[in-house]
Image (cartoon, rainbow, N blue to C red):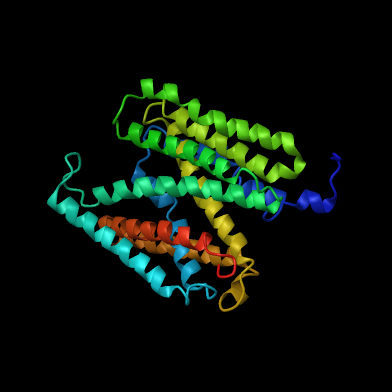
Amino acid sequence: MSSTLTAKEQGQGWLFSPATDLLIVANVAWPLLALLGAVAWAGEGITFLQLYVISVAHRWITVPLVLFERRFFPAQARRFGLVAGVTTSLTGVGLLLAYALPHPKAPDNLLIYLMMVDYVWNAWHFASQHAGIFRIYGRRIGEMEGAETEKAVLRTMALWAILRVALTMQDLVDIAWLSWFDPLFFIAPLWWWFREIRKSRRSWPRISYLGSLVLLYGAVVGVLHLPQTSGIRSGVLVAHALFHAIEYLAVCGWSMMGKRGGIWSWAAPRPWLLIGVVVVLSALGNGALLVLGSPWLWGLATLWVSYLHYAWDGMIWKAPAKTA
């Protein structure tokens, strides 16, 4: 294969452009986000609640993506409604369970069981999203082989790191012995990364995305050895949450650009404006609940919309091409 690529080939594979993809999909500037987070949380540890606050907007955007999608929502409204009903019922069951069986470590927290379910579901959602974006890049360059293997590789790495965060932040285990297993979960992702590098320069979208991702998750596991009040540790966890939220909003913007009809006739040429509106409204609404209303009510609403986000997101991205 010739080492010289045409202009068309050089643009192949990227969702937007090399610079834009690197910034908002591969999130190569995540170390800067981590540095800013380290400064903001210097001397104090970040909590799961704070991580929810800084990344809540991307959870809400799934709702308009579904409700305004004329190509599949009207035909499957009952199915989406059933899923919404199940998530609402799950939320109610969690509240009743916390009331009837108070958690020994947080007897006054009626959201504790909902948060536990959310953490596990969110971990799978994180892992699936990374694998899905990597697969989108694969399809754009015609790389169809090894899809199931790469999915397993990325999911395993992400799930292990997120599990380690929970175990460490809740002081459930001594990480001294657990850390011996960490390298095992990065061998396959690193091997896959070198595999992409060896192919050709047409794989640069996948190379940059996977490289940034592996480095991020390596940092997430690495900073768990630092004190909980370490600014660097808090900063990396903030960068991890923002990485996920930013890449999701970016892929949503890319998806909007191909939509037609209804509101999309206006939004498709200007997806970032619509995303900006959702982010601002989400910030204002969540801020009002937190400051003027009830933090407990905010937590309940956030957990419910998070469940909806996970469930509906899995449906819309897996929808058949003719109806998606």
Measuring from the top left, give residue 99's x and y in whole percent: 15, 53
Q: Residue at x 58, y 56 (%)?
A: 251
Measuring from the top left, give residue 89's x and y in whole percent: 27, 62
**In this picture, is 162 found above or below 316?**
above
Is residue 37 among what the camera can see?
Answer: no
Q: Residue at x 69, y 53 (%)?
A: 140
**In this picture, is 28 found above or below 322?**
above
Measuring from the top left, give residue 202's x and y in whole percent: 75, 44
Residue 128 lies left or right of residue 99; in this view the side is right
Residue 12 lies left or right of residue 102; in this view the side is right
Q: Residue at x 51, y 35 (%)?
A: 217
Q: Residue at x 17, y 48 (%)?
A: 108
Between residue 68 and residue 3, name the one nearer to us.
3
Q: Quadrant of the C terminus?
A: bottom right
Between residue 289 and residue 86, name the one nearer to us.
86
Measuring from the top left, give residue 133's x and y in whole percent: 58, 50
Between residue 29 and residue 87, name the one nearer to us.
87
Is residue 113 among what the camera can see?
Answer: yes
